[in-house]
Image: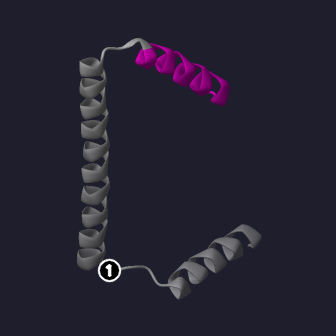
Amino acid sequence: MTAHEREQLIKDINVLLHQAYDSTLDEIYALLKRIDDVDDEEDLKDIKEAREDIRINGTVSWDEIQNEIRNEINKDIA
């Protein structure tokens, strides 16, 4: 979605929101809040999985990364 399309969509939604009944607005708010909560839960799950992966598999040190880069450069030169 382009920035212009996004902006137009938000404007269209805003028009509909202004026309909605209060009870509908409450429902829309609850739905958006649930979506936001699910996104937060997924982010936390991803963070926990990444930490567990680091705990199990360890991390790569900066020296190891630099050595890999040097080896790749040397392969390309050779």
- Kindly give the residue lying farthest to the right in the view shown: 77
Name above or below for residue 4 compared with residue 69. Answer: above
Residue 36 position in % (x across, y down)? 32, 43
Colour setup of the view: one colour
Judge by depth and name the residue closer to the eye, 70 or 13: 13
Question: What is the magenta range?
Answer: 1-18
Question: Which residue is identified by label 1?
Answer: 58
Q: Main secondary structure of the magenta part?
A: helix
- The residue sitting at 25% across, 44% down in the picture is 38
The quarter of the picture where residue 70 lies is bottom right
- Kindly give the residue lying farthest to the front in the view shown: 22
The answer to whether 48 appears left or right of 14 in the picture is left
Kind of residue indicated by mark 1: Gly
The quarter of the picture where residue 66 lies is bottom right
Is 78 in the magenta? Answer: no
Residue 43 position in % (x across, y down)? 32, 54
Name above or below for residue 36 compared with residue 54. Answer: above
Judge by depth and name the residue closer to the eye, 65 or 30: 30
The answer to whether 60 appears left or right of 34 in the picture is right
Classify mark 1: helix, strand or loop: loop
- The residue sitting at 24% across, 33% down in the picture is 30
Label 1 packing within 10 angstroms: few (<14), some (14-19), many (20+): few
Is 14 in the magenta? Answer: yes
The answer to whether 4 appears left or right of 43 in the picture is right
- The residue sitting at 62% across, 77% down in the picture is 71
Residue 4 position in % (x across, y down)? 66, 25
Residue 53 position in % (x across, y down)? 27, 69
The answer to whether 61 appears left or right of 39 in the picture is right
The quarter of the picture where residue 9 lies is top right
- The residue sitting at 23% across, 71% down in the picture is 52
